[in-house]
Image (cartoon, coloured by chain):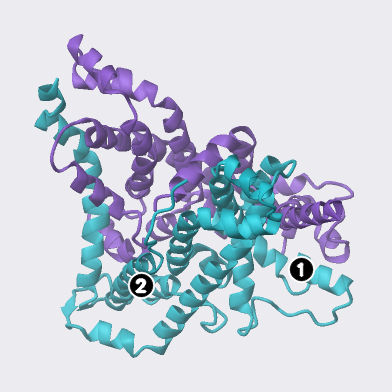
Amino acid sequence: MRRIGYILLYVCLGLVAVFQIFPILWLFMFSLKTNQEIFAGNPFAFPTDPKWENYLKVFDGGIGTYFWNSIWITVVATVLTILVASMATFAITRMKWKMSGLVLGLIMVGLMIPIHSALIPLYNMFLNVNLIDNPLSIVITYVTYNLPITVMILLGFYTTIPREIEEAAIIDGSSIHRLFFRIILPISAPIMSTTVIINMIYNWNEFVFVNTFISSDKYKTLTVGIQNFIGQYMTDWGAIGATLVISVLPIIIAFLFFSDKIMEGITASAVKG
Amino acid sequence: MNKVMSNKWIIFLYTFPALLLIAVLIVVPLILSGYFGLMDWDGIGAMEFIGLDNYIAALQDSKFWESTLHSFLLALFSAISLIGYLAVALILASKIKGANLLRKIYLIPMLLSSVAIAQLWIKIYNPSNGMLNSILMWFGVDNPPAWLADPNIVLYAIFIPIIWQYAGFYILIYYAALKNIPESLIEAAKIDGATPLQIALKIKVPLIMNVFKVTIVLSIVGSLKYFDLIYVMTSGGPNGASEVMASYMYKLAFSSYDFGYGSAIGFLLLIITLIVTVVIQKLTKSKDEIQY
């Protein structure tokens, strides 16, 4: 009886796993098929003769530009976010001043607001300072809108740093900058790596800001760029599949290597109560 | 020591970049949104002050109410589906072999961009060649629905990829909370003769109630802001049947160039989100903190 119960539980969990994973496998499979194979054949079948040409076609079509834009914007925005967030978190948690709670509260406001409420004024501001269709507008919005979550994740670690570390450094004649850059930043490396990975995923996947602020193809990132591609390939399922696989592959590869960090970051970013 | 750590200039230097960015790119735009809502403005020409006309128009705009209703329906679905995620997490946390691998598999869709998810599900829902209808026809269904083109089912059809995207996220959170329950409590209940179901419902669920309440807020507020997936999958169609607040605002501003009215809707979205956040937090506030 107990055995049957356990088997049933495993079947449930297995079905959920199939539901979660199968659409992605299906995507990989149809990215390697021809239209005839997709339309006439069994959706569960492996491609008989994998059409890697689909991927070549997409790269010849110019997806490389979008890919490169996604990479550099993701990396630059992530580095800046973590630097600015670490400095603010350091001042809020380690320095002694009265307004620290208020400043933290102000930063945290960003966690709750719907970005769409700020979108029109943001667009207007960037238009006025000539930053529309300029990747700088994307980088600074990414930095700003990821600050709250990054500070929140850093906060827990920063409050647990022992006072003795600071005292020792200051008594040795170290300046605050030296303390921050040479001692605090290095010891916060584990939690920083969590924020790096969370920021990278957010930036890589972001859509609304790029879709609104960027109009030239040469500045578009993958999320917006693949929209163009898919429009252009309309009925060529293989090319559409290849486009989608190229856009999600970096994240899936990152997950294979850093799944524990990613899960830690996602849990930390959610339980804000 | 204290003197060094309370140096005003250093504090200013370290917090200024963050504060400047938040003030200029979050706080000011939110206020401006309310202000632009008072204008008749196409985004390019001059603004004309028209008082509360846009806000009054919004309250009489059936499309606005429809999109609000859809947003709240999605929020309701999302909140109800939490029970399912909790059930899966309860199973997963009950000494299942491979639990760690399974929760990783569950999480994968959450990592993909909403745009990729939307494009993938457009293909899955494709009436003639999509995966779903292929399976249905295989099982002998003659006329499977055109999922995204049918105004009566499109909202439900969109909700499936939303579940797909977020299931792993909530399961992960519940699983982490369940693993924090001390083993001794479970052992004590077992010795008293409690069945696994009793242990799950009477001990585990009450102990993680605080986490569950947080996820209720997350899922409802998150749903009210929902945009990317819907915008890419249906852009609110067919004929507004899947329009939500954010997509309606976006369409007004960046397709119809009605920046004044769009700002008003954006500002109402902010107000609605804030009110709902406060109300749910009040409703789910626990009177006594659980200690264990």
| Chain of the residue on which disc 2 is drawn | B
Please name the residue shown 51% across and 50% down the image. Answer: A205
Where is mark 2, residue-wise? Answer: B253
Image quadrant containing the N terminus of chain A: bottom right
Instruction: Indicate the position of residue B30 as horizontal and vertical percent values.
Output: 25, 63
Q: Are marks 1 and 2 on the same chain?
A: yes
Give the answer, above or below, for where B264 lies relative to A167: below
Please name the residue shown 51% across and 82% down the image. Answer: B240
Give the answer, above or below, for where B77 lies relative to A68: below
| Chain of the residue on which disc 1 is drawn | B
* Disc number for residue A204: none
Asked where in the image residue A190 lies, by quadrant, the reply is top left
Where is mark 1, residue-wise? Answer: B132
Q: Is residue A215 left or right of residue A48?
A: left
Instruction: Indicate the position of residue B217 as horizontal and vertical percent values.
Output: 43, 63
Chain A pictured colour: purple
From this viewpoint, is residue A89 visible?
yes
Q: Amino acid at mark 2?
A: Ala
Name the secondary structure under disc 1.
Answer: helix
From this viewpoint, is residue A230 visible?
no
Q: Which chain is cyan?
A: B
Q: In front here: B217 or B237?
A: B217
Q: In front here: B17 or A40?
A: B17
